[in-house]
């Protein structure tokens, strides 16, 4: 089919990268490459002028990228590094110096010289077997396209001027393009090329508009103004749909929206299981800015506030005052709900200056978290002071990471006692009944849970690290990704042991790893007796919904079956079958892809 | 002019290896020094002032490469480069 078959329905399938369904008019954006460029030789007397022409075009390109960067919508600021790397490539010696060198030496025009430089870079990158690195050649191509356009004087149509409600159809959208999109007007977009992890996909998710990429020939098949349906859940795109297809998708769209809003509407209500057990659902956070998102998604407090950011932000250690202001703000915003502040969980290697540290062969097993803090009392006490001072302004709880045995806990408590004495002497107010807990993330702490439980007010199970340490699997080693199994029977047994120890000692226990926000893990956690979960804020609505459909009594009976299973695969299959009957939406095709935290 | 040349074997210790951000840090460091840096892996040598050149060397974690610095401030440069590597480019995952 070609564009001449006006009005004929045609369906395409691509890769769904950002969920939602839209129906609207197509707007073709010409992002085709600058195809024709002239190759010609330059006379000796014109060489310096040709170099200037090239320099001018690169300067313009830099200005354009800087303009785009500065005008990026607030929610995209985190992606500015993509443009930074493009800016760096413009002036890279393999591109910039090499092109000037070619103009002068081979006496050829700037376009030709630039193309030759690109070819050379491309052939160097093709030989690299690391996919991440070889893909960076796309960034170089993007930059070269822009420079070529500026050399030819072609105006590139800016996407920021699109002022009707349209669906954008393009061969490819560069990060610069997507950053310019007017999100109130652009309903969605589709492209010929790209994959799940392309920059455009990442940005579309941030903008929350439906996007399908990798359609191969969309720009050839879609005509300007054609009616389009884009299903960002399944990856389907329908060009010039018939009336009944439109109705079908409108219904689908309504179902999706209704479902989304229904869980959002009730997400601020408490999560109570079918048989009446209330489950506390909290949010994890790292940056101060995330507090409001936590509230909006219906969280009942912050179950894990990671405090590393302030220490990594600059070369200098943060002052007590900086820390105090930060903690106080979080405590005040989230009050009367509690915030659990976890003390520093960094390795010594992360501290830029002032610490002579030997390079560690196993950083995950090295001098980090509470071990580092106990070795550096000045740093630790400064943070403890800040947390205690902030406790006066809200409902603050304090938690130590990576505790591996009783002595460590007692040492840390001893230091906390000293800090409290100091504050008392200085007449500085703090919450004298502040709750103290520990992360359970080292296998030895699981085994010692009964003893440890007598010395704290709560446990928080950090499943991410616990999986890594219990299964001896490096989390960041891609070769071992298949072994990183939340459903490993050993892990389930460990969680049970911790829950039992906490229950016997009468202290509370929560889970704050990624397992807590995984729809398929929740059922297991609840059947084990966990009654508090802390997760990525975006996961809260769906997890609360799932909790409301579970009868803990039934889940417990089911759990006996689970404990008889011996491999992670069997457990996973068992649980997902069960979950699909409990929450039918989870079984709907393409549904889970809609939850991008998974 | 004194033309100093220093060679040193180094090992890439950060988890991501010499990816874009790490390479960018090396290039930025080079801009603060007069000497020129070359990174050699097997028999291929990359220009330490070019992020693209460094990337094409393809150095995942654990790779051993040779750093060669030529110029008057090569010693300071080498020291700074070492620090950067030891701090694993201040990488956070």
Image (cartoon, coloured by chain):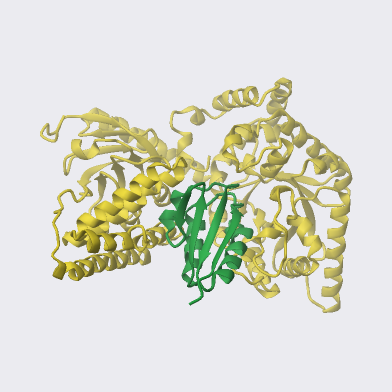
Chain colours: A yellow, B green
The N terminus of chain A lies in quadrant: top left
Q: Is residue A163 left or right of residue A517?
A: left
Q: Residue at x 14, y 70 (%)?
A: A45
Image coordinates for residue A411, horizontal then vertical, percent: 87, 59
Tally of numbered tags: 0
Residue found at the very far bottom of the displayed protein: A426
Whether A308 is drawn above or below A187: the answer is below
Specify whether residue A157 is in view.
Answer: no
Specify whether residue A384 is in view.
Answer: yes
Q: Nearer the viewer, residue A377 or A239?
A: A377
Whether A587 is drawn above or below B33: the answer is above
Q: Nearer the viewer, residue A59 or A303?
A: A59
Q: Nearer the viewer, residue A111 or A173?
A: A111
Image coordinates for residue A353, horizontal then vertical, percent: 66, 69
**Splitting the image into 4 quarters, where does residue A504 fall?**
top right
Q: Nearer the viewer, residue A413 or A194?
A: A194
Image coordinates for residue A113, horizontal then vertical, percent: 24, 56
Q: Residue at x 51, y 49 (%)?
A: B41
Q: Residue at x 41, y 55 (%)?
A: B52
Q: Is residue B62 left or right of residue A197?
A: right
């Amino acid at each position: 089919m070609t564009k001449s078959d006006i009005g004929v329905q045609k369906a395409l399938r691509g890769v769904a990268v950002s969920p939602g369904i839209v129906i609207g008019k197509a707007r073709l954006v010409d992002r085709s490459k600058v195809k024709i460029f002239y190759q010609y030789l330059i006379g000796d007397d014109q060489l310096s002028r040709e170099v200037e022409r090239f320099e001018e075009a690169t300067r313009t390109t830099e200005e354009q990228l800087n303009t785009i960067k500065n005008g990026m919508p607030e929610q995209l600021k985190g992606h500015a590094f993509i443009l930074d790397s493009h800016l760096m490539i413009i002036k890279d010696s393999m591109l910039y110096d090499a092109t000037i060198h070619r103009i002068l030496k081979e006496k050829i025009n700037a376009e030709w010289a630039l193309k030759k430089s690109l070819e050379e870079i491309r052939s160097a990158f093709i030989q690299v077997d690391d996919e991440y690195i070889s893909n960076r050649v796309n960034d170089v191509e993007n930059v070269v396209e822009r420079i070529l356009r500026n050399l030819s004087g072609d105006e590139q149509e800016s996407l920021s001027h699109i002022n009707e409600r349209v669906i954008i159809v393009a061969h490819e959208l560069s990060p610069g393009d997507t950053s310019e999109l007017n999100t109130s007007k652009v309903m969605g977009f589709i492209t010929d090329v790209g994959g799940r992890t392309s920059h455009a996909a990442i940005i579309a998710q941030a903008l929350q508009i439906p996007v399908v990429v990798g359609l191969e020939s969309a720009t050839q098949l879609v005509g300007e103004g054609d009616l389009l349906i884009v299903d960002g859940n399944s990856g389907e795109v329908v060009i010039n749909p018939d009336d009944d297809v439109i109705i079908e998708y409108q219904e689908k769209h309504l179902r999706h929206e209704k479902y989304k809003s229904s869980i959002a509407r009730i997400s601020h209500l408490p999560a109570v299981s079918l048989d009446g057990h209330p489950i506390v659902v909290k949010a994890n956070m790292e940056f101060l800015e995330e507090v409001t998102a936590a509230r909006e998604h219906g969280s009942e407090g912050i179950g894990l506030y990671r405090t590393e950011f302030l220490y990594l932000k600059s070369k200098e250690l943060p002052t007590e005052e900086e820390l105090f202001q930060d903690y106080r703000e979080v405590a005040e915003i989230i009050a009367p709900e509690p915030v659990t502040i976890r003390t520093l969980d960094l390795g010594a290697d992360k501290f830029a200056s002032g610490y002579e540290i030997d390079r560690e062969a196993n950083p995950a097993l090295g001098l980090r978290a509470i071990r580092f803090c106990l070795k550096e009392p000045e740093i630790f006490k400064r943070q403890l002071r800040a947390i205690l001072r902030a406790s006066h302004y809200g409902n603050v709880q304090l938690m130590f990471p990576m505790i591996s045995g009783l002595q460590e806990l007692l040492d840390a408590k001893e230091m906390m006692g000293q800090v409290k004495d100091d504050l008392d002497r200085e007449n500085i107010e703090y919450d004298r009944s502040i709750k103290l807990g520990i992360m359970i993330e080292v296998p030895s702490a699981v085994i010692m849970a009964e003893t440890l439980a007598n010395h704290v007010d709560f446990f928080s199970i950090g499943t991410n690290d616990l999986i890594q340490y219990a299964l001896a699997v490096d989390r960041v080693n891609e070769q071992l990704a298949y072994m990183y199994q939340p459903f490993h029977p050993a892990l389930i047994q460990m969680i049970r042991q911790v829950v039992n120890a906490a229950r016997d000692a009468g202290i509370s226990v929560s889970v704050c790893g990624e397992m807590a926000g995984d729809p398929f893990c929740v059922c297991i956690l609840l059947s084990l007796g966990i009654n508090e979960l802390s997760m990525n804020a975006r996961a809260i609505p769906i997890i609360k919904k799932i909790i409301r459909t579970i009868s803990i009594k039934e889940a417990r009976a089911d759990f006996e079956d689970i404990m008889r299973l011996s491999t992670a695969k069997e457990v996973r299959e068992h649980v997902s079958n069960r979950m699909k009957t409990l929450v039918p939406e989870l079984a709907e095709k393409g549904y889970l892809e809609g939850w991008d935290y998974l | 002019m004194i033309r100093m040349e220093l060679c040193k074997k180094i090992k890439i210790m950060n988890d991501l290896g010499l990816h874009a951000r790490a390479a960018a840090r090396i290039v930025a460091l080079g801009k603060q020094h007069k000497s020129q840096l070359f990174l050699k892996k097997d028999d291929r040598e990359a220009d330490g002032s070019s992020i693209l050149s460094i990337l094409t060397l393809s150095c995942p974690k654990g790779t051993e490469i040779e750093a060669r610095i030529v110029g008057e401030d090569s010693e300071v440069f080498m020291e700074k480069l070492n620090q950067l590597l030891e701090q694993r480019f201040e990488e956070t995952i």
